Image (cartoon, helix red, strand yellow):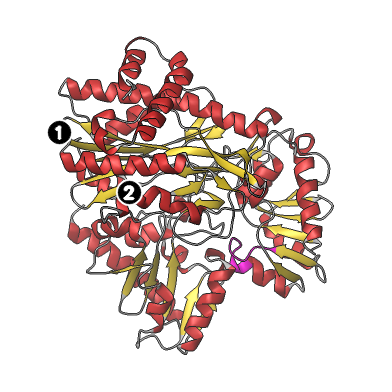
């Protein structure tokens, strides 16, 4: 397809949308990268922003005006968006430096109604956006129909697939016990029931999984959980598998999603806990219109789900050992290809890693699209080789591969940066600084009550010392055969009041990115564990157990920048890799691993 054809299609789609806007008297329309479930991963028929703009990132917002359009993305996508979106049709702005509603409020040509689909935005977004626009004399208007859908003639059809039951050998606790515990919390918080909007909360509570969304093994739906543990699950009943009722226990009813408004009306006069940050605006407005007293508060499932139980923790350990075997086989293959002068491209490398991972026991699907990035492409921290022509690995530079798997017993996420030929002195220096930060965080001990915000500096300190930094969080939560990006735990400069607790899994992934040159990231998943108690006050002392099992590339290290303790940590970690993963390897793969983990 030529550039002129792309522009023509973009223009045609924007014009069709503007005609729908004019029919409804709208002076602007908000198009987020979202669906009615507000999840990170969208099925193809919900990729409205991609269809309209060409942008394929996981976060963004488009504002369509009668004669202009503007897209807003965060720092992860500043390079990618300029490659995918034609600035002749769509202006490009920073999501953080120019928040969309602030930008819109300053546009003189917008003097009236701003349309939005309340299913595609959180209630919190509606509240804050409404305040900004009202101050500018504008009105935020709920639309009953999604205008993009009315224009999207060749929209893909959904492909319904049945959910499946997750056994106690993986979940560690039955649904009846989970629902009773969460129901008790609901009552303690002063509510009669809770509206659970997040699909992964519902799936965890019922010990089921599905295939409605790529990379996230869930069945889509929401639920009303009463204080006595009884639950109404609103989803497509045809997706519910045989054996569901005895699996979940008494007190669970499945209803089609169309019955949700009726169920809200039956709660009239009751107090219902609902999370304005995770639930969409439509559901909150519908609850209010039904005469329900809405108690704003965090989803009561999120924190218990994040604190893995003993069975889930062991499952995560087991999954990471098998996943590590796949990664080691991949790294050994990659070295052999480079040595033979056969430099693969990003797609074939990612494909081979995917095949090796798929061969592991209990593997279901990738946990996200593999980031397979050669040389300068690695400077885009969320690069996707599927968005263009995959580049060939570049001699005397680095290759960054960020990948993961969904297994019945756990979810993995690992990044390794690999030398292709001889890396330069600058690359080696910055790789070492990144690895030092990763090690510092992995070795941290901290008192109970500490948040990820307080620990973030540990990973950045060595880069900061050289006037360097990276434009993403240091760590995100990871679920147990659920979302690879799980809340509420995180490690980032962004403030959070959620303390790290035993059983939580987070990533430890500092990086460094030099535009148009190279990118570096070192990532392991770590488990929050209890390591003792504070001497002065007896408070619980916490630390991290490293779950990921694969070697780092010693060829990229400047050994003189590592302290003795850092070298000992790395040697000890590599010994663990050999001990745990080595039994799953043989022949050339095992020999490669023994060579790769030679003590410093």
Q: Write down the quadrant of residue 80 in the picture.
A: bottom left
Residue closer to the observer: 9 or 86: 86
- Name which quarter of the figure residue 541 lies in: top right
Residue 408 point in image, percent of width and height: 58, 31
Is residue 86 shown left or right of residue 597? Answer: left
The Cα–Cα distance between marks 1 and 2, rounded to whole angstroms, is 28 Å
* Label 1 vs 2, first from the N-terminus: 1
| Circle 1: element type | loop
Q: Residue at x 35, y 71 (%)?
A: 97
User: Residue 63 in magenta?
Assistant: no
Q: Is residue 405 left or right of residue 561?
A: right
Q: Residue furthest front?
A: 536
Q: Please provide the residue range marked out in magenta.
A: 274-282
The residue wearing badge 1 is 395
Q: Residue shown at 48%/20% (left/top)?
A: 580
Mark seen at residue 462: 2
Of the two numbered discs 1 and 2 in the rendering, the one whose residue sits closer to the viewer: 2
Q: Camera-side residue: 338 or 158?
A: 338
Q: Residues within 10 Å of mark 1 (few under 14, many from 20)?
A: some
Position of 425 with respect to 16 (left or right) is left
**Percent of width and height locating residue 43:** 48, 49
Tell me the chief SS of the magenta region: loop
Q: Quadrant of residue 479?
A: top right
């Amino acid at each position: 397809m030529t550039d002129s054809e792309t522009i023509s299609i973009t223009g045609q789609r924007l014009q069709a949308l503007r005609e729908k806007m004019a029919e409804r008297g709208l002076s602007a329309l908000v198009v987020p990268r979202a669906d009615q479930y507000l999840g990170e991963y969208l099925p193809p028929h919900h990729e409205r922003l991609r269809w309209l703009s060409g942008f394929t990132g996981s976060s963004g917002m488009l504002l369509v005006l009668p004669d202009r359009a503007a897209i807003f993305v965060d720092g992860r996508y500043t390079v990618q968006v300029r490659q995918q979106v034609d600035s002749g049709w769509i202006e490009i702005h920073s999501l953080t430096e120019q928040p969309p509603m602030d930008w819109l409020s300053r546009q003189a040509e917008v003097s009236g109604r701003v349309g939005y689909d309340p299913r595609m935005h959180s209630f919190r977004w509606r509240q804050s956006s409404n305040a900004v626009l009202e101050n500018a004399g504008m009105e935020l208007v709920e639309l009953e129909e999604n205008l993009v859908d009315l224009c999207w003639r060749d929209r893909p059809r959904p492909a319904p697939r049945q959910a499946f039951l997750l056994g106690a050998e993986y979940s560690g606790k039955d649904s009846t016990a989970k629902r009773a515990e969460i129901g008790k919390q609901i009552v303690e918080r002063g509510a009669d029931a809770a509206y659970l909007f997040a699909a992964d909360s519902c799936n965890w509570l019922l010990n089921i999984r599905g295939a409605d969304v790529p990379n996230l093994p869930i069945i889509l739906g929401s639920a009303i959980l009463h204080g006595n543990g009884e639950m109404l699950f609103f989803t497509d009943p045809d997706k519910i598998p045989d054996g569901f009722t005895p699996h979940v226990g008494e007190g669970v009813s499945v209803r089609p999603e169309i019955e949700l408004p009726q169920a809200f009306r039956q709660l009239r006069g009751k107090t219902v806990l609902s999370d304005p940050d995770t639930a969409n605006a439509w559901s909150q407005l519908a609850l209010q219109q039904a005469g329900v007293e809405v108690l704003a508060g965090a989803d009561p499932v999120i924190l218990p789900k994040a604190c893995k139980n003993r069975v889930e923790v062991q499952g995560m350990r087991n999954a990471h050992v098998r996943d590590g075997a796949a990664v080691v086989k991949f790294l050994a293959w990659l070295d052999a290809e480079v040595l033979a002068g056969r430099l693969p491209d990003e797609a074939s490398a990612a494909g081979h890693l995917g095949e090796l991972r798929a061969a592991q026991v209990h593997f279901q699907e990738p946990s996200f699209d593999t980031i397979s990035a050669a040389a300068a492409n690695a400077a885009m921290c969320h690069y996707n080789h599927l968005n263009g022509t995959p580049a060939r690995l570049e001699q005397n530079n680095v290759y960054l591969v960020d990948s993961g798997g969904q297994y019945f017993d756990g979810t993995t996420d690992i990044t390794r940066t690999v030398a292709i030929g001889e890396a330069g002195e600058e690359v080696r220096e910055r790789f070492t600084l990144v690895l030092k930060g990763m090690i510092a965080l992995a070795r941290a001990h901290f008192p109970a009550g500490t948040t990820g915000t307080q620990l973030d500096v540990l990973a950045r300190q060595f880069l900061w010392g050289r006037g360097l930094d990276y434009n993403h969080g240091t760590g995100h939560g990871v679920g147990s055969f659920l979302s690879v990006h799980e809340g509420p735990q995180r490690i980032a400069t962004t403030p959070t009041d959620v303390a790290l607790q035993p059983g939580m899994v987070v990533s430890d992934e500092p990086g460094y990115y030099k535009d148009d040159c190279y990118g570096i990231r070192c990532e392991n998943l770590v488990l929050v564990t209890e390591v003792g108690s504070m001497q002065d006050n007896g408070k619980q002392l916490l630390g991290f157990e490293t779950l990921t099992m694969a070697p780092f590339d010693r060829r990229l290290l400047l050994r003189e920048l590592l302290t003795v303790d850092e070298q000992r940590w790395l040697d000890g970690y590599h010994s663990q890799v050999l001990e745990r993963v080595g039994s799953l390897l043989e022949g050339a793969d095992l020999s490669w691993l023994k060579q790769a983990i030679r003590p410093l």
